[in-house]
Image (cartoon, rainbow, N blue to C red):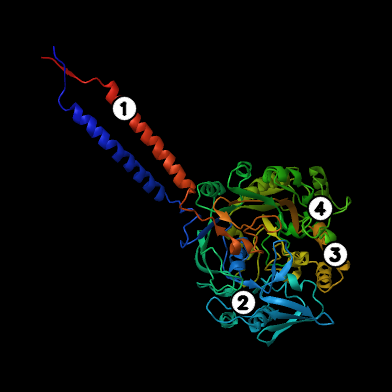
């Protein structure tokens, strides 16, 4: 018996040995292509000369990019990059030169003289001069533009005495002149627009800032490109894309996958794990912000709100039906503090703490029974004994309560409030609406053209200003139809507000700031619910130069732009350093190649050749 290997088995061995390297190469090419085509952008760490794109995820969508109309935080973030302030905000919140290089005041304190920076140009190439600055202030004053006229209080007029000197003349000394949140606008563009509040924006938006807005896709993204001629130095980032999300879990997942370089409004459940992730920096803090429940207090016949909310005693009673501690634990998952007054504590200089803390006698606690007693005393009783309170005309009280679709905390807190108010004998129609619906109801006008706010109660959040007086100025009577969303009016409040704006003595002004908060707290057009900690993340494995603002998020604060200007990618080298994605790719290829070789060896060794007998 002679053994012969079956004809063709030797050729199979050679074929396998030839195919294995080809298979491994094919896998490498396929995986590279799959990763390239997965939809993930190239890492920010780029080769020199490649376009540098910064992608940031937000849950808040701009309502309008017209700077005389919009009010959402996401819109302000775009404007602060597109335009410049006369006096800007340093990372610690203090004033610093911007379009104005320096400033001084007249002996009587009524005239401010600003020296304008030379060599600044608008993004269309035209020079920016003191005449643009004077135009901006006069434009706001003359047209009584609601977005800014609370800041221009006491300003009579502005004039350019030469190309680089602008004088702002006030009716009396103005305490907050260096803190005004007013952009400088180009005269050659806006002087041609008679009604800026009706103007439909076109792109690009021309300003003098470090970036130029060139595209806005509603509810999807805003795209800006760098201004290479920016007076503060050409940014390294070529392009910024703000991407808008309806689900913050999806936003975080895209951040983890490398599609985003930063994200704001992180879900509390995911935040702890991100704090432990290598190459990620997290931020948790509050800067001048609070969550609130607002009541429709508009005391005009056209109002479509429930009239009971105009009664201060009714609003005070509801204050006792709010458990702020539980709102922090449930709504914010512990990331925040119970609220009280409009200026949050510990967020202004310790030598001048603007926060007013109510006295023990004034402070509202959580006591449902007391809320019921106060409603009874105010004349809102359950005369039928059916558990439903009636107004003073005997009509059962039904109140609409809206939470915002854009925030989970708003929805959680809304459910709690609806339950507490229901326990007080009120019928609460609770609903979740998006910002657009709420905006239309707040700024509603009837067929006769009269302002007719069409809401009862809703939850929102407020981001204040570097000067506490500017935050409190939102609630004066002439801000109804604009920043004064509770449509509340109080004569003493208006008087004290005017006084504090012209008070240059810090201690005397502080006392007025406290008095304003006291009036607002007692009258309760808002119930300040919480001081939330805003949760955000940024990628530090691919970027250097993130600059936090007052210890908080380095982006999406609408005040400080240092991150955008100073940020630069970590450039990958051709030596031993490789990107994370390439390293991962090689590991995968090596593992698959090893597996293929093992399989081939097993096939060759374990499969016995067929014997042919002679």
Q: Position of residue 600 (x, y in %)?
A: 30, 29
**Disc 2 or disc 1, which is closer to the eye?**
1
Q: Furthest residue to the top? A: 1
- Tag 1 residue: 601
CA gap, disc 4 to disc 2? Answer: 53 Å
Does 596 sit left or right of 95 as displayed? left
* Mark 3, secondary structure of its residue: helix
Badge 2 or badge 1: first in the primary sequence: 2
**Disc 1 or disc 3, which is closer to the eye?**
1
Label placed on residue 379 = 4
Q: Residues within 10 Å of mark 3 (few under 14, many from 20)?
A: many
Badge 2 or badge 3: first in the primary sequence: 2
- Tag 2 residue: 185
- Tag 3 residue: 510
Q: Position of residue 428 (x, y in %)?
A: 67, 49
CA gap, disc 2 to disc 3? Answer: 32 Å
* Mark 4, secondary structure of its residue: loop
Q: Residue at x 65, y 84 (%)?
A: 131
């Amino acid at each position: 018996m002679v053994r012969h290997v079956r004809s063709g088995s030797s050729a199979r061995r050679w074929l396998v040995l030839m195919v294995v390297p080809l298979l491994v190469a094919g896998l490498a090419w396929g995986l590279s292509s799959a990763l390239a085509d997965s939809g993930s952008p190239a890492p920010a760490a780029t080769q020199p000369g490649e376009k540098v794109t910064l992608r940031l995820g937000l849950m808040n969508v701009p309502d309008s990019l017209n700077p005389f109309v919009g009010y959402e935080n996401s819109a302000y973030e775009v404007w602060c990059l597109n335009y410049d302030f006369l006096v800007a905000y340093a990372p610690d919140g203090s004033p610093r030169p911007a379009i104005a290089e320096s400033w001084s005041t007249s002996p009587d304190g009524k005239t401010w003289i600003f020296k304008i920076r030379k060599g600044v140009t608008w993004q269309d190439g035209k020079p920016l001069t003191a005449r643009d600055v004077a135009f901006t202030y006069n434009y706001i004053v003359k047209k009584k533009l609601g977005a800014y006229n609370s800041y221009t209080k006491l300003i009579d007029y502005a004039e350019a005495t030469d190309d680089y000197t602008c004088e702002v003349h006030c009716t009396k000394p103005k305490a907050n002149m260096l803190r005004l949140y007013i952009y400088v606008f180009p005269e050659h563009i806006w002087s041609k627009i008679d009604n800026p509040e009706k103007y439909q924006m076109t792109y690009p938006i021309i300003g003098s800032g470090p970036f130029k807005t060139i595209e806005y896709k509603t509810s999807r993204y805003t795209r800006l490109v760098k201004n290479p001629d920016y007076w503060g130095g050409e940014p390294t980032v070529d392009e910024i894309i703000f991407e808008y999300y309806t689900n913050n879990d999806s936003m975080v997942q895209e951040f983890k996958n490398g599609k985003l370089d930063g994200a704001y409004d992180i879900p509390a459940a995911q935040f702890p794990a991100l704090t432990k992730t290598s190459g990620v920096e997290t931020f948790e803090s509050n800067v001048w912000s609070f969550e609130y429940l607002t009541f429709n207090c508009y005391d005009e016949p056209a109002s479509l709100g429930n009239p009971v909310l105009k009664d201060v005693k009714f609003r005070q009673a509801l204050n006792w039906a709010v458990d702020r501690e539980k709102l922090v634990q449930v709504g914010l998952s512990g990331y925040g503090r119970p609220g009280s007054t409009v200026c949050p504590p510990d967020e202004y200089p310790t030598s001048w703490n603007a926060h007013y803390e109510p006295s023990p006698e004034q402070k509202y606690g959580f006591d449902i029974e007391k809320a019921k007693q106060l409603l009874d005393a105010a004349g809102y009783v359950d005369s039928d004994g059916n558990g439903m309170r009636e107004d003073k005309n005997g009509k059962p009280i039904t109140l609409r309560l809206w939470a915002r679709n854009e925030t989970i905390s708003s929805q959680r807190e809304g459910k709690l409030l609806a339950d507490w108010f229901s326990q007080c004998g009120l019928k609460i129609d609770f609903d979740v609406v998006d910002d657009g619906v709420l905006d239309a109801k707040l700024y509603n006008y009837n067929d006769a053209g009269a302002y007719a706010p069409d809401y009862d109660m809703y939850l929102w959040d407020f981001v204040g200003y570097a000067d506490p007086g500017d935050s409190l100025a939102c609630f004066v009577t002439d801000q109804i139809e604009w920043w004064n969303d509770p449509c509340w009016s109080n004569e003493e409040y208006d008087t004290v507000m005017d006084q504090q704006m012209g008070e240059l003595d810090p201690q005397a002004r502080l006392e007025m700031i406290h008095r304003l908060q006291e009036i607002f707290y007692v009258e309760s057009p808002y119930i300040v619910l919480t001081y939330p900690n805003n949760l955000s993340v940024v990628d530090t494995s691919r970027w250097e130069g993130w600059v936090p603002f007052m210890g908080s998020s380095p982006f999406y604060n609408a005040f400080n732009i240092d991150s955008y200007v100073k940020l630069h990618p970590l450039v990958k080298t051709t030596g031993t350093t490789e990107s994370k994605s390439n390293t991962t790719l090689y590991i995968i290829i090596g593992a698959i190649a090893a597996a293929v070789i093992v399989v081939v060896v097993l096939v060759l060794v374990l499969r016995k050749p067929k014997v042919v007998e002679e």
